[in-house]
Image (cartoon, rainbow, N blue to C red):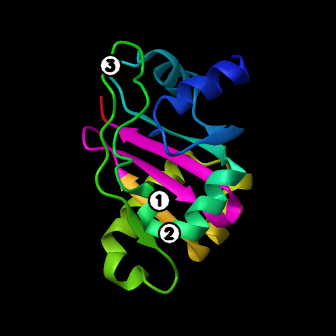
Amino acid sequence: MNRVRLYHRAQQLLPEAIQTAGLRGLGMSAGQLRYLLFGLLLSHESRGAVVLELARHVVAAIQREGLGYFEGATRSRGALAGGTPSYYEAWRHLSSGNQDGHHAVCAEWMGVMDDGVLPGERRVLDAAWHDDAYLTRDIGRDAWLAVLPAAALVLYSWRDAG
């Protein structure tokens, strides 16, 4: 598959405020890839992850504004083929200093991340997670969106039952 096409499809899952500079990696099977591209995966479980590079100007804006940057960023740019836009819950800010109040959120998201992230990306994401993470969840499905400004990364991961 063409990386440019994958990148453009993955961008459709993100709110407009989450601007990216490229595709960093994928963690999914060919069937899961078809789901991301076309929304065609039927009758079995789909799970995976897409890692994108966060645009530098967005990293700077998040560092200035913190959680306020994400205010109103609760609707995706577009949708997968045949679907509707994604709507996200309110964003949460997590860091090593404030994770105590969010153990359930952290555990659930980390479980989803385990399903789809490539081993080489795992170390980078783990380190960035402890610096700062901004998280939200797709209201209509078992999917998470995380922005990790310290690593300039965006992770979209999902786990759908068929």
Looking at marks 3 and 1 on the same chain, the residue that comes earlier in the sequence is marked by 1
Question: Is residue 48 shown left or right of residue 140?
Answer: right
Question: Is residue 140 shown left or right of residue 45?
Answer: left
Q: Nearer the viewer, residue 158 or 101?
A: 101
In the picture of the structure, the residue carrying the numbered disc 2 is 66
Q: Alpha-carbon neighbours of circle 3 within 10 Å: few (<14), some, or many (≥20)? A: few
**The residue tagged with tag 1: helix, strand or loop?**
helix
Distance, label 3 to label 1, CA atoms, is 27 Å
Do callouts 2 and 3 mark residues in contact (Cβ within 8 Å)? no
The amino acid pointed to by label 1 is: Tyr
**The residue tagged with tag 3: helix, strand or loop?**
loop
In the picture of the structure, the residue carrying the numbered disc 1 is 69
Visible residue check, residue 24: no
Q: How many marks?
A: 3
Q: Taking 60 as reference, is 42 above or below it?
A: above
Q: Quadrant of residue 75?
A: top left
Do callouts 1 and 2 mark residues in contact (Cβ within 8 Å)? yes
Distance, label 1 to label 2, CA atoms, is 6 Å
Where residue 56 appears, x then y in whole percent? Answer: 71, 52
Q: Which residues are magenta?
A: 137-160
